[in-house]
Amino acid sequence: MRFKTFTSPHMSPARSVNRVMRQVLYALVPGTVAMAWFFGWGVLVNVLLAVTVALAAEALMLMARRRPVKPFVTDLSAVVAGWLFALAVPPLTPWWITLIGVGFAIVVAKHLYGGLGYNPFNPAMVGYVAVVISFPREMTLWLPPGTLADMAFTLPQTLQVIFLGQLPPGLTWDMITGATPLDRIQTELAMDRSLSDIQASPFFGAVAGRGWEWINLFFLLGGLWLIQRRVITWHVPVAMLGSLALISGLFWLINPEVYASPLFHLFSGAAILGAFFIATDPVSGSTTPMGRLVFGAGVGILAYVIRAWGGYAEGVAFAILLMNMMAPTIDHYTQPRVFGKTPARKEG
Amino acid sequence: MTSTPHKLWRFNGGLKLPDHKAESTQETVFKAPLAEYLTLPLRQHIGEMAQPVVKAGDKVYKGQIIARCDTYVGAHIHAPTSGRVRGIEEHPVPHPSGLTAPCVVIEVDGDEDWGEHRMPPIEDLQNLDPARLRHRVREGGLVGMGGAAFPSAVKLNPRPQQAIDTLVVNGAECEPYITCDDMLMRTRADAVIQGLLLVKRTLQPRQCLIGIEDNKPEALRAMTEALGGEENDNIRIVALPSIYPAGGERQLIRVLTGREVPSEGLPADVGVVCHNVGTLANIYRAVIRGEPLISRIVTVTGSGVKRPRNLRVPFGTPISHLVAHAGGYSDDVERLIMGGPMMGFALASDQVPIVKGTNCILAARGEEVDPPGPVMPCIRCGECVRVCPANLLPQQLYWFTRARDFDKAQDYSLFDCIECGCCAHVCPSNIPLVQFYRFAKNEIWSQEREKQEADAARVRHEMRQERLAREKREKAERMNRKKQALNDKPAEDKAADTGNDPKKAAIQAALERAQAKKAAQGADTTPPDQGKPPSDTRTQEKTR
């Protein structure tokens, strides 16, 4: 009798790309729900829209590149990219910005570089940065967290704003939008107000922006679950959040009236989402254990530098893209010592 | 126990795998009935191929040497039972390539007749001479039972500069499904311990460490009983965490001693010799019963056979025969693997024989060994880096191999890959990583071989050129000498003559003058040398 032959190992594989991506998506759910709780339907509409655009762009690009569509669309990597993009942009982002941002992420940042596994930069962040620098006004139109809002939008109202650009009667953009906590600190510091004054506003919560604290806490839970499920390793989050806490703590100790506390930095903005979900993107990040520590630390420090002294209130996206550039070099210089080889051997 | 727990070290990575050991340990070891024919490949160990010493039609006795291998790294092959040699034929052998190789085929007569071929038992074990033990092991054709089939005598003969202080006994058996060592320890723990004592006397190590994975509690118990405690006479039984590949020699040595065998070295370089439990039992068997290595325990398991179990089988038994004694195949058997699921190779046919290195036959159904799904691009997730017990960067090796950049692959320590399969097992993209590494290694080897062949050809060519030149030179010299002799002789005669006859001398002198003149005209570069006969000049011209 004839048998099928394959090469070893013959054990059923333990994981698949689809499974990895699916777990990332599960882990995003709590934070996303929390975000929707505070910012309304817009968050969910954005996620749905971005994911749809991502899948469509992915399918179109696969067809254009004459690649099999099904295995790549079902690997869910495009869904993850779209979802992350949706979490990065303001809750009432016009539909065409999502279209451009996600389209750019999938078409240019991903497929023009060779598709899954070949992109040197994190696609979601490329898409986000592209719209941030192209449409700066729209990208700062954050809503104040729901607990503070005078009125919450209904789903039809939200759809109307996102797809038709029509605000409910009697409202103007100025009335409904506000800055993110990081934005607010940056602008008000520029007006020579002290941090203790700024943070005395009800806009801020116990440690960071009101609402943002909770959102970040839920992203943190999802991230810890990913580590526990061995989808990601602890190296990047720990290094990134650690370095961010360290450097912000240092400046905070020097002058707490000008520099926000480490907890504020960790729980406002995208630090936690970035640390667990974006900087851990395997394709564009570092892969050696030591390299991941270096990579994460670099992201944390750069994010702080941009937040504190750069032109943008939030620095995580830029920091990740900058470190993406460094990843191959970091990998080269952080090769683990091979079993049975003396460390002295290292050449070139 | 009174002893303190033995300190264990870790190796990087590794995997916790479902061990599937229970299936084949339900029954005790069963001695498989003889097959009709035994097919014995001439190469069953690492090293040179054995040379047959029997021919078609010869009557052979059980235990008789039928093929010798007298190189240092080699092992003889013995007739597993009595019968008649049908011939030395090309036959499919267990090898991933599925190619054929020369085999001695024995038609079994069923008498199990040893004739005079049982080696005499060695009596005085207390004073056993190391050289005698080595000789016995060598004559018995013993090889390591762990799967690699390295000739055992070599491991009993460390070089003087390698001071062996530790003997490691490998009872880890870390691959899923395989239980032949487990069952051996359960049923023949005494033989293992006795074999260990023999080897201990030869190597004189300071300590002996028996490593057994903790998923074999019965084996641990039986061995402890046979030793008379967890620690006795500087021998210690250590339960190891079950982390694949803890049974890899280098990994086991690391776990038990904390030492790392150098990348290009051998365990002896760090003072360790490692023997598999099965090897030790065979050493004991060879010494006290005088039996060479003619059979072994093989695990026949997997959901593809109806009655998974361990069988003691003579070498050369066809796998199909073995499967028949494990209840036969289940209906939807798909894959037949020799060895374990992580490192074994898939066989296309069950008409190949059991050889010395065969520890397991795994017949698997589809759901047990998913046919690899579509291969996706590497997403650089680094999971392979995390599990690699050799601390390599498997994905980098994969990229280099894909790009056929073999130099870079070697820079990244390709040859330190032990092909354990951990990386491929965890790869979410389903990339057959080990296959890439094997390919790369083969390419490098064949390039090396080509280079060596080219070098050899060049050396051969140069030597030929040199030889031709030398022959020409020697021929010329010979002719020279001959001519010289011919010329000298008449000169003597002439001298003798001229002395007697002035007229003749005058003619001779005139002749010589004329010849010299002629030569001076002919050869414009060399002025005529009076002392040299002109013929000489011509010879030289020819030689040039």
Image (cartoon, rainbow, N blue to C red):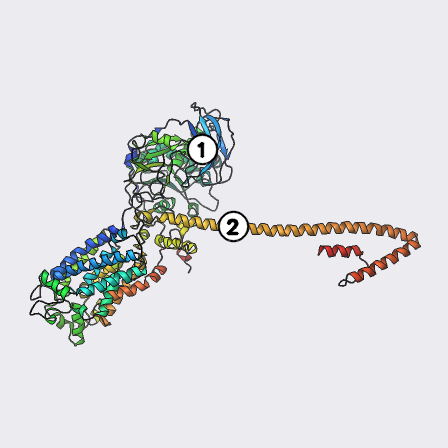
- Cα distance between the residues tagged 1 and 2: 32 Å
Q: Residue B249 carries which label?
A: none
Residues tagged by mark 1 and mark 2 found on one chain of the structure: yes
Q: Earlier in the sequence, mark 1 or mark 2?
A: 1
Q: Quadrant of the C terminus of chain B?
A: bottom right
Between A290 and B513, the one lying in front of the other is B513
Q: Mark 1 belongs to which subunit?
A: B
Residue B533 rendering spot, x and y as whole percentages: 80, 56
Side (left or right) of B532 relative to B14: right
- In this figure, which residue is indicated by the disc labeled 2? B452
* Residue B485 rendering spot, x and y as whole percentages: 79, 50
Classify mark 1: helix, strand or loop. Answer: strand
Residue A285 locus on image (x, y percent):
29, 59
Picture residue at 38% right of the left edge, 44% below the top: B249
Q: Where is residue B340 in the image (x, y as percent from the top left)?
A: 34, 40
Please give the residue where the numbered disc 1 appears in the rendered image: B40
Q: How many labels does the image show?
A: 2
Which quadrant of the view contains residue B358? Answer: top left
Residue type, mark 2 in image:
Gln
**Chain letter, disc 2 residue:** B
